[in-house]
Amino acid sequence: MSGKMFQTAAREWLQIRRNDTGLRPRTHQTNEGYVQALNRFFGEMDTGAIQAHDVRRYQLERLDNPITIAGVCRWKRKATASTVNHELSAFAQIMRAAHQWPRLASYVFPLPVPGWSPREILSEEEEEHLFRIAAGSPEASLAYMVASITNNTTAAGSELRLLRLKHLFLDARNIPEIYIPPEAVKNGSRPRKIPLNATALWAVQQCYRRALDLGATEADHFLFPFRRKRNCYDPSRAASPWFLRKSWECLRRISGFAHLNPHDLRHLCITRMLENGVVPETVRAIAGHVGAKMMEYYSHHRARVKYDALRLLDRKPVASAPAPRSSTETQHYR
């Protein structure tokens, strides 16, 4: 692949990766996304001509996404430092396959990733407001259904997107469940069956009816079919990773929670379980892999819970405290 345009080398690298049967479909989709972003900058460059300063410029422009090409931004949105680092990891593999990475390796450094800070968890009042508003908006109906499932199961949108009809167990004679398959998760400890409470069952049933209306009839058809064009869906393909974007943006707008992400409701569900005394082992069984550090990450309690805990320590002030004695009175009683 040496001496070829970067986009050609990237295409050949993707094909090599696809031939690796040990990689999951989600990994291939992620790699394709990385290559798509990289091609917008390096695509027309010769792999042998790319220099370290080009890589540095990619990092800076990817973070800022300036208007650089005929008044149009290269990418749809700015990237985080973590995303840029993942993209450059793919870049390094492509350049290594093109026998060009050794000359760059000593001069390319990952971007510093900001330290962890707790996510803001919705209060009970905010949570009630969110779902009340969502329930009344047809434009946000898909976001409402997915949010209801995540908020009651911990199953994230990326996991739900790859559910097939055969992964739903809604027989009324048994406890209703959904099965998160291996191809839908990031690691081997996340595939799991999750029981459905009444709210989650209702939301899954709504999504199931929607899938039927969109043409899903076979067990291997997806719960969220792929949208080919307006009013045309392919149930044999999973929805794109951005299938929630339009509906979720509507939900943000009408609820007033401008920075709410679908994954935030996974955090909220885990937080609520911990607040209600569910033991960590059960939380992990429901949510999948949550290590000790991640358990602490997810268990940031809402302000009301913290307040109630501290209120138990509160002591009422003494009604009529005696005035302090003067020095002469103190001497008299000695």
Image (cartoon, rainbow, N blue to C red):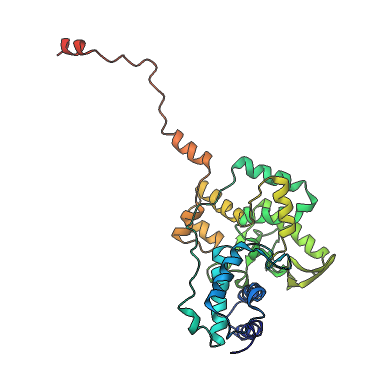
Left or right: residue 198 versus residue 312 is right
Q: Position of residue 262 (x, y in %)?
A: 64, 56
Is the residue 331 above or below the residue 80 in the image? above
Left or right: residue 108 versus residue 147 is left
Is the residue 3 above or below the residue 247 in the image? below
Left or right: residue 180 versus residue 89 is right
**Residue 137 in view (yes/no):** yes
Residue drawn at the location 64% of the way across and 45% of the way down:
127
Q: Position of residue 147 (x, y in %)?
A: 67, 54
Q: Position of residue 79 (x, y in %)?
A: 60, 63
Residue drawn at the location 51% of the way across and 60% of the way down:
284
Q: Nearer the viewer, residue 52 or 296?
A: 52
Looking at this rendering, what residue extends furthest in the right direction? Answer: 231
Q: Nearer the viewer, residue 327 or 57?
A: 57
Q: Quadrant of the C terminus?
A: top left
Q: Specify the quadrant of the image occupied by residue 129.
A: top right
Q: Quadrant of the N terminus?
A: bottom right
Q: Specify the quadrant of the image occupied by residue 154.
A: bottom right
Q: Nearer the viewer, residue 208 or 245?
A: 245
Q: Nearer the viewer, residue 254 or 57?
A: 57
